[in-house]
Image (cartoon, grey):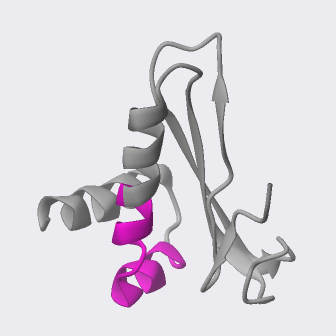
Amino acid sequence: LGSTGIGGGIGIPHGKIGDIESLIIGFGLSRDGVDFESIDRRLTHIFFLLITPENATSLHLKALARITRILKNEPLKERLLKVTNADEVLSIIKEEDETF
């Protein structure tokens, strides 16, 4: 329907699949950036892949909103650009999520 490159170096590709029972979220990082057809035409560096069960529209929308809200924090984005492993990503996200 449109680009999931929301601008500011962030992409949130997302979709629904019938064969899963719970939310799946993945994180990706491109230090060089990727042309992800972002709405601001800038390269995309931070990716959150969101997959939800086919019948979980509410969960899907809530997860998208939460990810988008967290990523409005510029210092958090800068920290994510410097991560070197999955534990760092989880720690940063948990820390930010607890402040809301």
The residue most toward the left is 99
Residue 60 position (above or below residue 33): above
Residue at the spot 85% in from the left edge and 74% down from the top edge: 37
Residue at the spot 68% in from the left edge and 53% down from the top edge: 13
**61 or 24, nearer to the observer:** 61
Residue range highlighted in magenta: 66-82
Residue 39: x and y, percent?
74, 81
The question of residue 23 being in magenta is answered with no
Residue 91 position (above or below residue 54): below
Residue 47 position (above or below residue 63): below
Residue at the spot 82% in from the left edge and 70% down from the top edge: 36
46 lies left or right of 40: left
Quarter of the image for residue 98 reads bottom left
Residue 49 position (above or below residue 31): above
Taken as a whole, is the magenta stretch helix, strand or loop? Answer: helix
59 lies left or right of 41: left
The question of residue 79 being in magenta is answered with yes
Which quadrant, please, contains the C terminus?
Answer: bottom left
Residue 16: x and y, percent?
64, 30
Residue 71: x and y, percent?
42, 73
Residue at the spot 64% in from the left edge and 10% down from the top edge: 19
Quarter of the image for residue 31 reads bottom right
Quarter of the image for residue 66 reads bottom left
Residue 86: x and y, percent?
47, 51
76 lies left or right of 77: left
38 lies left or right of 26: right
